[in-house]
Amino acid sequence: MTESACRFCRSRSGTVVLDLGDQPPCDYFPRRDDPGPDPVHPLQMWLCAACGLAQLAADPTVPEEPRGTEPAALVAQAADAVGRVAAAGLLPSGARVAEYGSPHGGSWLGLLADRGLAPVPGDEPADLVLDCFGLMHSADQFAALAERSARVNPGGVLLLQYHSLATIIRCGQWNALRHGHYAYYSTTALAAMLARYDFSPRVAWQFELYGGTVLLAASWAGGPGITIDGSVATLLADEARTGVRDPAVLSGLQLDTESKAKAIHDWLVSERAAGRTIVGYGAASRAVALLRRANVDAALLPVVMDASPAKQGLRMPGTDIPVASPEQIATYQPDSVLLFLSDLLAEVRNAYPGVEAAGGRWVDADTLGS
């Protein structure tokens, strides 16, 4: 990325901290009968030395974003988050709200309407501007955050939810890196970014979703704003200990890449040699790079189940593994179902009890090689 500039501050000083090589766009699901080869592009994470924003390097892909089915864990987390924000006194009845959602789906507007908030039409200003996993999909981070902050009415609140970079580091979640996801936020970097628009973080809430997500409330630094409760300072101190701005720390994800890919491949080879049948569950973006780095094909993993009708009947990008409806799990009589999204475990066990009733088990891919 030396020839490019930071997606936020435009600095050209930074370091490639993670390189996954050539990867197919993880939202490009070819037809099952499409022989390929699929298009591939370099996939790298670059850490800006000036503002500390971890970001996707060059991305020539055109997002297709096949709509997924909203997991129950995400729905539950949204309800929990709205309850916490309301308890902090930040959702006054009659307030007006603007929402920037993720192209992957999900909305808080229904939950907010239940508390008396009304959406604004078009791009009008609002008392509450909410971005739930949407900001990371903007290639121009400076313009995207400028737009959101400019829409906040005086005395209003900007709410930003994001998958924490500290979580990615601590949990070795290197396959969170994907084309179309342009930024990976630490609260440390995001606080500095908000300061460019005279906004200041006031309150932070943490959730277990995706291993660790943050909901940050910010307001105009020169206005009455909202009470600072110490949660932001605690989070910033935790991130400093984690090393979210240290290229050497982030580069440790490269080692996680190699160990995790080897663990997945070796386990599948061992299971096949023992005559056991394994199927996958969750045709998610993070599964794409994992399967490719682990050199997994349909001989090792004959199918990946996914609840999204938009993906069923297609195949995983970069490999010959087909995607099928979860209703077909029983036809494979699997000894194990390899789960690529840890947050779905409780949901899928409840939805498909036949797996365990028949003697099978659910195996969390994140635990292999840990």
Image (spheres, helix red, strand yellow):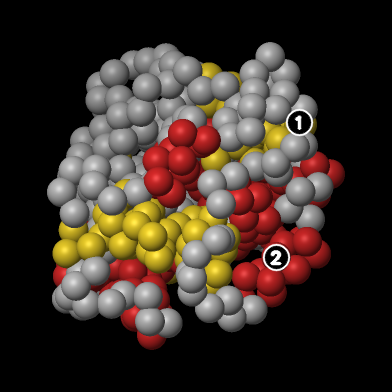
Q: Residues within 10 Å of mark 1 (few under 14, many from 20)?
A: many
Picture residue at 80% right of the left edge, 42% below the top: 247
Q: Which residue is mark 2?
A: 236
Q: Helix or strand or loop: what does disc 1 sit on?
A: strand
Mark 2 and mark 1: Cα distance apart in space: 21 Å
- Image location (x, y in percent) of residue 312: 22, 41
Picture residue at 23% right of the left edge, 63% below the top: 96
Residue 36, located in which quarter of the rendered image?
top left
The amino acid beneath tag 2 is Leu
Picture residue at 28% right of the left edge, 56% below the top: 126
In the foreground, 193 or 312: 193
Q: Helix or strand or loop: what does disc 2 sit on?
A: helix
Q: Is tag 2's residue or tag 1's residue first in the polypeptide sequence? A: 1
In the foreground, 344 or 108: 108
Can you say which quadrant of the picture contains the C terminus? bottom right
Picture residue at 80% right of the left edge, 64% below the top: 241
Across the whole image, how many numbered discs are drawn on residues?
2
Q: Residues within 10 Å of mark 2 (few under 14, many from 20)?
A: some
Which disc, if any, is residue 104? none
In the foreground, 156 or 131: 156
- Image location (x, y in percent) of residue 346: 37, 74
Q: Which residue is mark 1?
A: 14
